[in-house]
Image (tube, helix red, strand yellow):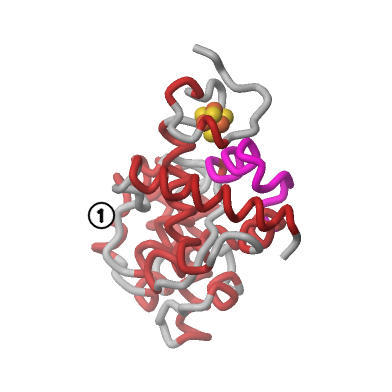
Amino acid sequence: MSISENEKRERALKIFHILKEEYPEARPLLTFSNPFELLIATILAAQCTDERVNMVTPLLFRQFPDAGKLAGAALEHLENIIQSTGFYKQKAKRIKDMAQALVERFGGKVPESIDDLASLPGVGRKTANVVAGNCFGIPAIMVDTHFQRVSGRLGFAFSSNPLKIEPEIRAFVPEEIQTRFSLVINFHGRYCCKARKPLCPSCKVEKLCPFKEKTVK
Ligand code: SF4
């Protein structure tokens, strides 16, 4: 590990310890009760709010509680249920295709490894990390829009490509805290380090943050 990665790790650990106290409730905000449900909900959450997704999934999961049932669903029926999440035609096809692949390649069971998850149609690295980290205890770096913004401001990663950010962060954040680290950074982005106007004066990690355009009030 290079000196700068050592420095990054030290600072990341300090920030993590402060933020995990600040956001003890940090967790996925999508409602789910098993890996299959979190997988579907995360796909539906693309370009949509978690709140909106949580409104449609109770009916969806009641009617299609497993991959076998979802694989056999009529597309039009799926479209009707998920319509309010936006891009519903693509999303309906995406979750049906994904369910078919789950049945054909994994016996209808959601695989645990990030690479297996990301090999499913319609499942990107972020979704794969979300499911593996939150359902199977696999060290996960979940690069969503909040994580990307905050890790850039904190000087942890600079790429605009989430696929590059994931290995950059994995290089210096210890495996045993990676999933929790992702969740607290995500919460910090939602509630303090906001996109338009970060709340720097009240930020608990302000002294450890190198961002040049901090707000002053
Ligand atoms: S000081 Fe400002 S820019 Fe830095 S992490 Fe805190 S809110 Fe974000």
At x 49%, y 53%, the residue is 182
| 160 magenta-colored | yes
Asked whether residue 94 is in view, the answer is no
Image quadrant holding the N terminus, namely bottom right
Looking at the image, the residue that sits furthest to the top is: 217
Q: Where 117 sits versus 156, above or below?
A: below
Left or right, residue 76 beside residue 212: left
Q: Which residues are magenta?
A: 146-163
Q: Residue at x 47, y 41 (%)?
A: 48
Residue 73, image x and y in percent?
A: 39, 68
Q: Residue 179 location in percent, x, y?
A: 46, 61
Q: Is residue 131 visible?
A: yes
Residue visible at 52% across and 30% down? 206
Q: What residue is pinned by disc 1? A: 58
Q: What amino acid is at disc 1?
A: Pro
Ligand 1: give its quadrant.
Answer: top right
